């Protein structure tokens, strides 16, 4: 089956089943996956980021995937690097006659490559960091709301990430962003729409499963490799709360309760971003996440036939 778009995009909040859906589509359409996840780029951060690499196997073969496990843990991978690496993967896939399937939940990464911002690497601003050093996460979040968003505010849940977000926004306030220097990409976008109740159920079940699979031991291994606790906390969500837990600052019950709440809030912010993309001119074809994978794939196939 042919698709009129040289890029298929699958997005949705955490626990909506994006990867399995994208893999099934890639299998049908002779495609390869390009990840759009700001934390799955890191090696060794597997359980906490939900890589679920087994999901890339289908019908006895492995679907190729890109931009997973490309950076060392402790490093602060950024949007400029993602644009660069996305374009390299996209051109490679297209050069081999395959269909690139962009899949993930990091809305800024998806929007940055689809909209075609030409971004620059953002240097550290020591004076700004000093000025913001004693502000709380709540105060930093309020400051961040004053900017035109060029940073992934979806997972800004630590002061360090918030300061970095403000640093990026401040840089681009004084450094104009060129649009369309990045290639214009014609993408067909499908979103997985999951009810609040089902999303909460899946998040809670998956969190317990990942804790049972050794998510805390994964963090212990990363700390044993010499990664500073603050560097893991910087990544937020699972790595923030698990680091606090394994360093004795949270009990097991506190870990589960606080992390569960944080992931629910994160999923809500993801959906807010995707709805914002629609207001900014993107057409997203929403599909019920509760449908069996085969039915979801059939809906996409029908959409492709009518394009």
Image: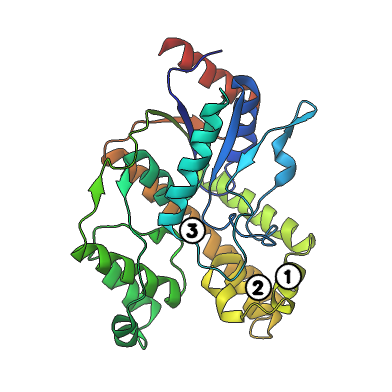
**Colouring style:** rainbow
Residue 167 in percent (x, y) is at 32, 71
* Label 3: which secondary element: helix
Residue 20 appears in the picture as rendered: yes
Q: Mark 1 to mark 3: distance in Å?
A: 20 Å
Residue that carries the numbered disc 3 in the rendered image: 266
- For the C terminus, the quadrant is top left
34 relative to 250, above or below: above
Measured as percent of width and height from the top left, residue 83 is found at 42, 48
Q: Are marks 1 and 3 in contact (CB under 8 Å)?
A: no
SS class of the residue under badge 1? helix
Residue visible at 79% across and 59% down?
213
Cβ–Cβ under 8 Å for marks 2 and 3: no
Q: Gap in Å between the C-alphas at discs 2 and 3? A: 16 Å
Decide: few, some or many residues near mark 2? Use Cα within 10 Å; few <14, some 14-19, many ≥20.
many
| Label annotation for residue 242 | 2
Per the image, the residue denoted by label 1 is: 216
Q: Residues within 10 Å of mark 1 (few under 14, many from 20)?
A: many
Q: Are marks 2 and 1 in contact (CB under 8 Å)?
A: yes
CA gap, disc 2 to disc 1? Answer: 6 Å
């Amino acid at each position: 089956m042919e698709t009129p778009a040289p890029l298929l995009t699958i997005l949705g909040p955490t626990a909506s089943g994006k990867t399995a859906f994208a893999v099934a589509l890639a299998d049908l359409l002779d495609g390869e996956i390009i990840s759009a996840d700001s934390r799955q780029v890191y090696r060794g951060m597997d359980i906490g980021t939900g890589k679920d690499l087994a999901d890339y196997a289908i019908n006895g073969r492995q679907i190729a995937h890109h931009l997973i496990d490309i950076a060392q843990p402790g490093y602060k991978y950024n949007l400029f690097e993602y644009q660069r690496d996305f374009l390299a993967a996209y051109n490679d896939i297209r050069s081999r006659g395959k269909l690139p399937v962009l899949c993930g939940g990091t809305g800024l990464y998806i929007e940055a490559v689809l909209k075609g911002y030409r971004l620059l690497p953002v240097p550290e601003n020591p004076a700004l960091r000093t000025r913001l050093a004693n502000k709380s996460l709540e105060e930093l979040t309020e400051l961040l709301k004053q900017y035109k968003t060029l940073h992934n505010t979806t997972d800004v849940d630590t002061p360090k990430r918030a300061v970095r977000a403000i640093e990026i926004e401040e840089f681009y306030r004084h450094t104009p962003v060129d649009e369309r220097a990045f290639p214009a990409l014609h993408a067909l976008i499908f979103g997985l729409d999951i009810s609040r109740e089902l999303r909460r159920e899946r998040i809670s079940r998956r969190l317990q499963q990942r804790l049972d699979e050794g998510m805390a031991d994964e963090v212990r291994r990363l700390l044993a490799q010499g990664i500073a606790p603050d560097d893991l906390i910087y990544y937020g969500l699972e790595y923030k709360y698990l680091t606090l837990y394994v360093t004795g600052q949270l009990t097991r019950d506190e870990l589960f309760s606080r992390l569960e709440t944080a992931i629910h809030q994160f999923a809500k912010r993801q959906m807010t971003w995707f709805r914002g993309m629609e207001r900014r001119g993107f057409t997203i074809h929403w599909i019920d996440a509760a449908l069996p994978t085969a039915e979801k794939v059939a809906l996409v196939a029908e959409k492709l036939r009518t394009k």
